[in-house]
Image: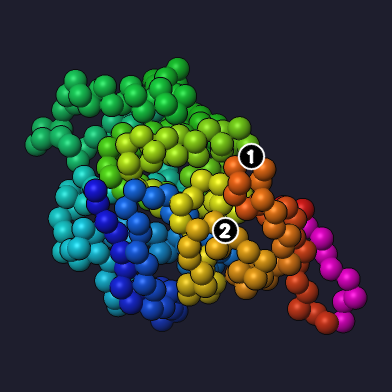
Amino acid sequence: MASLSTENLQIGYGEKIIVDNLNLQINKGDITTIIGANGCGKSTILKTMARVHAANSGVVYLDGKMIHKIPTKEIAKKMAVLPQSPEAPSGLTVYELISFGRSPHQGGFGRLTDEDRQVIHWALDVTGLTSFANQAVDALSGGQRQRAWIAMAIAQETELLLLDEPTTYLDMAHQLEILKLLEKLNREEGRTIVMVIHDLNHAARFSHHMVALRSGKLVKEGTAEEVMTHQVLKEVFQIDAEIVKDPRTKKPVCLSYDLIQKDQKMDHKKVVNF
């Protein structure tokens, strides 16, 4: 089973430092979610761990090796990456998109084998896209398109899945469906999953391990119970949160929160329902 970690990672764009001195250990066989306010560096960290974005300094290790020294095809056999808002070429069908996930397993001619086709049909089935196999990706709804990209990622059959906001554009039912699918892949196939998620309650429900960031720095990591606390959410999001336990899942839930006003002249808080 593949392992992933960072050591003293500094990431930036030009002279602007986004993440500084980050040390993370992604636990094998766990679902890890990264949470934090917009612009805190969540997606940047994911891109850097996937070798999409180069670090200023520090190292990302894949199976104990420096990831920038590993051949791309070898990485693709161990790690699948779903970026935020990916785009497919115009006219590409769902089946063709998913077939790209088989590329690391193909020989020099790039022809699909019977095994490849079997995996593609499985990915179509588990993501509920079988009836859309021959439709163009750009003709799908936002939610259907997102499921097609997830199908491509899982068709790659890697031990590691890195997903940047995988439930974007999905309604509540399809969000739950996708997260339960990822949970099943983790539970039954032992896949290690790292996700950036905005929905704190989904992050807490489906994670073994949570990582909370603020301004590119690690604030807290641990179980949902350790991260989903009033104090951590106050520091990370600048909110005054009410945390309760879900009677069914036994996981912490952010029931509601108020914005913490920085303007001391205001004599009331603005209430925002979660």
**Label placed on residue 105:** none
Task: Identify the amino acid type marked 1.
Answer: Arg
Tally the numbered discs.
2
What residue is drawn where x is 78% and y is 74%?
261
Q: How far from the left and from the top, in percent, is residue 146? A: 48, 38
Task: Identify the amino acid type marked 2.
Answer: Glu
- Identify the element where label 2 is drawn: helix
Q: Quadrant of the rendered structure where residue 176 is? A: top right
Q: How far from the left and from the top, in percent, is residue 248? A: 63, 39
Q: Is residue 115 above or below residue 82?
A: above
**Which of the colour schemes (rainbow, by chain, secondary structure, one colour) is used?**
rainbow
Which residue, as the protein is rendered here, is positioned at the far right? 267
Q: CA distance from mark 2 to mark 1?
A: 15 Å
**Label placed on residue 248:** 1
Q: How far from the left and from the top, in percent, is residue 94? A: 39, 28
Q: How far from the left and from the top, in percent, is residue 1? A: 24, 48
What residue is drawn where x is 77% and y is 64%?
258
* Residue situated in front as seen by the camera: 177 or 139: 177
Q: Which residue is mark 2?
A: 225
- Which stretch did the figure color magenta? 265-272
Neighbor class of circle 2 (other Cα within 10 Å; few <14, some 14-19, many 20+) is some
Most common secondary structure along the magenta stretch: loop
What residue is drawn where x is 69% and y is 58%?
243
Callout 2–callout 1 Cβ contact below 8 Å: no
Does 61 appear in magenta? no
Q: Is residue 248 visible?
A: yes
* Residue situated in front as seen by the camera: 132 or 61: 61
Q: Is residue 56 visible?
A: no
Q: Is residue 81 above or below residue 130?
A: below
Does 266 appear in magenta? yes
Q: Earlier in the sequence, mark 2 or mark 1?
A: 2
Image position of 250 (left or right of 12): right
